[in-house]
Image (cartoon, helix red, strand yellow):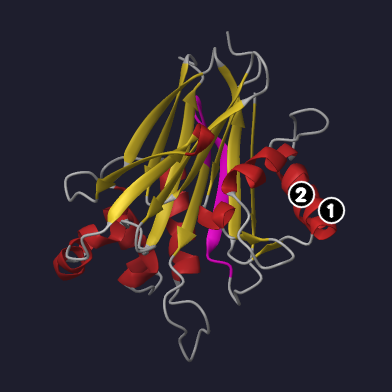
C-alpha cells in the first residue's frame, strides 16, 4: 500500500492555488486535493485572493478529519492567521482507506475535479470528471455566508459528470447536497487517483483543448514500482517529457493525489 501527491502551478497563473497531500492518520490512509478559486487579481497579491492559503487549510483540516464540520473548523483556522473568509473558496476531494477494514475506499468530492480508478484484472481505468456549467464550483465556503450562498444558487447552473466512454449525466445544483460520496471496491481496483480540474486545462500545440481522457491515460502510464513518490515521478515525467514532446501546455494549476491499495485482500 502507498500514498503520494503532486501539485504544480499552471502556465497562466502567478500563484499556485492547487494543493495536494497524502499520508496516514491512525489506521486511515488518505489522499487529498484542493483547488482554490482564481478570483480577481488584487493589488497586493496579484492573481490570488488568498485561496492558495485557503486550499491548504482545507486540505490540512481534511487530513485531520473529514466530516460535516470541516468548513467551520477551516474558517476558525483562517481567522487565526488573518485570512479572509473568501480564501476558503476552494474545491476539496478526499480519498480514504481504513486499513482496519480495507474492502472499500471512500472518496468525497466538494466541487469539481476527477476521480479515476484502475482495475486489477486488466489495468483499464474508470473515471468520473465533474464540471459545472458556468465553471463555478459549489464551494463549501458558501455555507459560511448566507448572501453568497443565495447568490450562488440563483445562477441556476447545472453540474455534470463525464464517465467512461464520454457518457455524461447532469443535474441542477442543489442546496441539499454539498459533496458527492463514492465507494471503490479494492478487490476490483488497485489504485485510485483524485485530481483537480487542471485535468481539463491542457492545450495542444494548436491551442486546442486536450480531452481529459487522454490526459488520464498518460497519468496512468506508470513505470516502475508503486512505492515512494510514485505519483510525483509519474506526473513529473508526464509534464517535463511527454507534454514537452507533444507541445502540450497546462494552463491551470494541476494537482493529483492517490492511494495504491496493493495487496489488499
Q: Position of residue 60 (x, y in %)?
A: 47, 51
The stretch in magenta equals 16-31
Q: Main secondary structure of the magenta part?
A: strand
Q: Which residue is mark 2?
A: 238
> Mark 1 and mark 2 in contact (Cβ < 8 Å)?
yes
- Binning the other alpha carbons within 10 Å of mark 2 as few (below 14), some (14 to 19) or many (20 upward) gives some
Viewer-nearest residue: 90 or 219: 219
Q: Which quadrant does the N terminus fall into?
A: top right
Viewer-nearest residue: 77 or 146: 146
Viewer-nearest residue: 223 or 245: 245
Q: Is residue 184 above or below residue 154?
A: above
Q: Position of residue 65 (x, y in %)?
A: 39, 40
- SS of the residue under disc 2: helix
- Binning the other alpha carbons within 10 Å of mark 1 as few (below 14), some (14 to 19) or many (20 upward) gives few
At 59% across and 31% down in the image, what residue appears?
259
Residue 218 appears in view: yes
* 157 sits left or right of 241 in the view: left
Figure quadrant of residue 106: top left
Residue 5 appears in view: no
- SS of the residue under disc 1: helix
Q: Tag on residue 241?
A: 1
At 81% across and 51% down in the image, what residue appears?
242
* 224 sits left or right of 186 in the view: right
Would you say residue 261 sits in the magenta stretch?
no
Q: Which quadrant does the C terminus fall into?
A: top right
Q: Position of residue 121 (x, y in %)?
A: 64, 13
At 51% across and 54% down in the image, what residue appears?
197
Amino acid at each position: 500500500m502507498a500514498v503520494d501527491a503532486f501539485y504544480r502551478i499552471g502556465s497562466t497563473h502567478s500563484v499556485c492555488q492547487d494543493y495536494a497531500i497524502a499520508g496516514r492518520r491512525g489506521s486511515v490512509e488518505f489522499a487529498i486535493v484542493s483547488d482554490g478559486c482564481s478570483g480577481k487579481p488584487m493589488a497586493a497579491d496579484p492573481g490570488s485572493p488568498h485561496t492558495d492559503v485557503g486550499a491548504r487549510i482545507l486540505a490540512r483540516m481534511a487530513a485531520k478529519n473529514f466530516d460535516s464540520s470541516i468548513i467551520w473548523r477551516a474558517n476558525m483556522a483562517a481567522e487565526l492567521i488573518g485570512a479572509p473568509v473568501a480564501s476558503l473558496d476552494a474545491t476539496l476531494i478526499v480519498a480514504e482507506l481504513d486499513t482496519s477494514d480495507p474492502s472499500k475506499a471512500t472518496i468525497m468530492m466538494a466541487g469539481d475535479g476527477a476521480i479515476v480508478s484502475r482495475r486489477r484484472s486488466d489495468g483499464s481505468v474508470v473515471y468520473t470528471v465533474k464540471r459545472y456549467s458556468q465553471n463555478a464550483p459549489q464551494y463549501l465556503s458558501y455555507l459560511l455566508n448566507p448572501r453568497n450562498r443565495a447568490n450562488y444558487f440563483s445562477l441556476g447552473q447545472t453540474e455534470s459528470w463525464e464517465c467512461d466512454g464520454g457518457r455524461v449525466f447532469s443535474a441542477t445544483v442543489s442546496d441539499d447536497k454539498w459533496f458527492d460520496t463514492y465507494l471503490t471496491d479494492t478487490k476490483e481496483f488497485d489504485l485510485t487517483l483524485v485530481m483537480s480540474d487542471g485535468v481539463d486545462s491542457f492545450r495542444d500545440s494548436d491551442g486546442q483543448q486536450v480531452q481529459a481522457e487522454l490526459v488520464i491515460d498518460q497519468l496512468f502510464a506508470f513505470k516502475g514500482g508503486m512505492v515512494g513518490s510514485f505519483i510525483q515521478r509519474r506526473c513529473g515525467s508526464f509534464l517535463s517529457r511527454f507534454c514537452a514532446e507533444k507541445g502540450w501546455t497546462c494552463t491551470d494549476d494541476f494537482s493529483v493525489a492517490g492511494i495504491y491499495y496493493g495487496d489488499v485482500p
